Amino acid sequence: MVGESNNMSAGNRSESKAQEYPLISFIQRNIRYLLILPPLIVVILFLVTPSLMILLLSFNKGSVTRFDPTNISLDNFIAVFSRPSTYVILRDTLGMSILAALVTLLVAYPVAYFISFKIQNFQLQGIITFMLVAPYWVDWSIRSISWLSILGEKGLVNYTLMSLGLVNQPLSELLFTRWTLLIIWVQTNLLFMIFPIYLSLTLIDPDLVNVARTLGASPFKAFTKVTFRLSLPGVVIGIIFVFISTLGDYVTPALWAGGLQMLGLTVQNYAWHFNWPMAAAYSVLLLIVTLGVIWIVLRFANIKQVFYR
Amino acid sequence: MNRDWTKIILGIYTVFVIFIFYLPLILIAILSFKSDASITFPILGFSLYWYIGPPGLIGTSGFTSGIFYDPQIAQAITNSITLGIATAVIVVPLVIISSLTLRYAFKGRDLIFYLLLAGFIMPAIIIGLGANIFYKTVGITEYSIWTVLPLTVVYTMPFGLILTMARFDPLMVEYENVARVLGASGWKVFRKITFPLIRTQVISTFFFAFTLSLSEFLRSSFVIAGVGTIPTYVYNQMSVTAPTPKWFALGTLSMAISLTLLFVVAYILTRGQRRII
Amino acid sequence: MPAALAVKSLVKRYGRNVLALNGVSFEVDKGDFFVIIGPSGCGKSTLLRCVAGILNYDGGEIYIDGRNVSNVPAHKRNISYMPETYALFPHMRIYDNVAFRLRMQNFDESEIKKEVKRALELVGLAGFEERWPSELSGGQRQRVALARAVVANPSLLLLDEPLSHVDYRLQRKLMEDFKNIHKNLGNTWVLTTHIQEQGLSLADTLMVMNVGVIEQKGKPNEIYESPRTVFAARFVGDINLYSGQVVEQKGELCTVKTNMGEFKGIYKGTGEIIGKTVAYGIRPNHILISSVEERRENSFRARLVSAYYFGEFIEYIFERPDGVQVKVHADPMPVKLGEEYAVSWDTIRGIILDKPSVIEGLNIEDVIYGR
């Protein structure tokens, strides 16, 4: 449906020309909608097409690196689903990603709430948000290895504990466990949780909370029934982001998780060993898991309404 | 006295979270001035070795040189900044036109909206692997930052879109209508009304696109060759040699630049008591 | 002399099912102060936006000063439009807001300064040039929006719901202000409003709209005294309406049998209406109250149940033993709540209407009782 539109401005100027060239007149009348084409083409070319190529390749066998239509089979998927390890990987991946998303949410929400509701000065709000952005200019691997300096055998934590005489031997289990992975994931994704929640909290009219209070809601009830409910779109976007970024991460688990197998890592392993069709098959599995979880999470909030009211 | 205890507790908590958030960076900054080659404690002495290197070794790469004189690091920094700026320069107009178009109801709007957000929904490894297969299929084999560019564009565009659309003035279409009736042509409406109203979002989008592509590794590592960007270069170097404070020196430098620049931008943008994000 | 605005068979659809304008045709004379009144959702705002050129339509033609503007873009129509929200540009000071049209027409800055000053003086906001829209009150914002709309004296001014944000008591004052500015400028104004407000009588021409169609157009007193349909009668001025059957018709003079008895009134339509269900209407200010029985043809006794003070008159509500109420507007008088009085009116004041609306197929009783 075409709602409010003003096509007249374009239609008029070239009426005589338009009659000769119907295509030109069509473009002029619909220029406002056709503007969506450049971004759409970029996405279709560099996101949709590659994904479809992965899908196609997953039906090939052997060490091909581009789709071969003469060599189609379901062998990869049969292999993927008949291996017991697949289910262990799936369980660990989903478990860790969901855990990371929830822990990040718990850490981030109070911060977002504080910035949007308890700081009235927009300048201070802006500076705090940008302070959270600044560390992302520091290279990702450098930030990653800094955890060696914190949790390593000679890292800050052990060094402090030993100088205080609390332990005699350095604690070696601080690094290379799934908890290390969790800490690093929470730390690297914090901003991407704070930011959408902050955004949706600032869209809430503070009077709504005031009204809820005068209608007899306790501060806690007013928060859960009004504020939190209205910030759900932000929460959902944050959860999706953290969840997806941890699902697709194949480096952090390899470095820090102490041998924990993850789905992203499995894809990368096959790609590394030039078994592209198998990597593609695991990618398809990853994509299915991703879309499934997004579908579930989107039940909790209509994120669209934030963007076009 | 009636104190806002929620505010105090949340304030303390926020400061604590920011401290933990910054702890690795504080350590990076301290350890980058170490005089020895380990990245752990204890600190035996301080020097500028990892920044300027030993005298006489100017212009060599690798383990022994300081970051200021390492030509490969200079190359990686140039590549990263070029990629970041190129991404931002492309993403900003794409975000402006798509966000403005999505204000109007038309057939397939929801589908297009979700497609444009797909870069945000697609796991990194699928984007990287898919792009690699795509380039192979169409016959592109020369990898550089320009083969990475499309990936950082589709990855950062959703962030700009979210940021810009969530902060739209609900009356924007009304302002534009009135401006038109008052005699402004299509382009003038954009220049005098629409753009000024979304200017802060546009600037924020620019910085987000730049920041995100600067630290992008998971997608780009599939389609880059040579020295590459800072993340791919550092990652490749670290997988062949043990980490030294040299990388911390590089990190400290990035941090110093980013904090200064972002503070200035945040300060300028918020002068009129406007929200920037 | 061509009409300032002529709309011919205008059709506008929203989606497939909603017909917002169903072939609307009317003309507005040059220099007119033209008010469109109708319930929310009747299409009057849509109509205004079509005329302004910011909404395209599905059929018909619009002429401004005799020129067909159907293909003229909004910025070349040389008209002004003030939306209900006022839409003051939030990123511009008052001066720049008012100067907008002049800037678009590339006026000299010295000229702009003069014109802006004149426009702000006209609306009584001289000296507000350097303020921001966010610093103004609702009323001041409206004045700035008006100044912005009248600057450079466009031939046609469209004001969408300018009275809806204003207190009931201020509506008349605002209309008088509008009227003065209008007289000063001498151009054509078209206003919309969704409730029958104070000061509607100030309109030169009134047009009543029902969903997508025009019910009646004319001078305010014409519509007030001789509404063509029950809908128009309900919308222009207050009225007591009762349903009944016509039992006698002698030229214009008819007798209607209602639940409360037989009343005589005037039927201005043509044709035989004996036996038909019609609306019998009587304006509240045409009813007389007395403590003794009056010898008028139309009267009954009822108990005074409430009285509301409206400044210029008092609204008395009377209730009959059978529960039927009647509204009377009169000057303050020595009456007591709970007492019984005789209410009566002259036959010439009784309005008999057989058409509920220009829309076909409506049940007259539904329209009478606002169902």
Image (tube, rainbow, N blue to C red):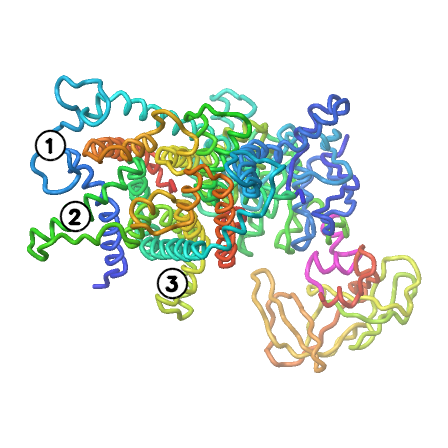
Callout 2 crowding tier (Cα within 10 Å): few <14, some 14–19, many ≥20:
many
Image spot of residue B76 (x, y percent) = 32, 26
Image-quadrant location for residue B61: top left
Disc 3 marks which residue?
Answer: A223
Q: Amino acid at mark 2?
A: Glu
Depth check, front residue: C35 or C183: C35
Disc 2 marks which residue?
Answer: A153
Q: Amino acid at mark 3?
A: Phe
Mark 2 element type: loop
Q: Earlier in the sequence, mark 3 or mark 2?
A: 2
For the point 47% across and 21% down, which residue is it? C110
Disc 1 marks which residue?
Answer: B35
Regarding residue C98, the answer to whether it shows in the image is no
Q: Nearer the viewer, mark 3 or mark 2?
A: 2
In the rendered image, residues at marks 3 and 2 fall on the same chain: yes
**Left or right of C280 on screen, residue A149:** left
Badge 2 sits on which subunit?
A
Image spot of residue C248 (x, y percent) = 91, 70
Badge 3 sits on which subunit?
A
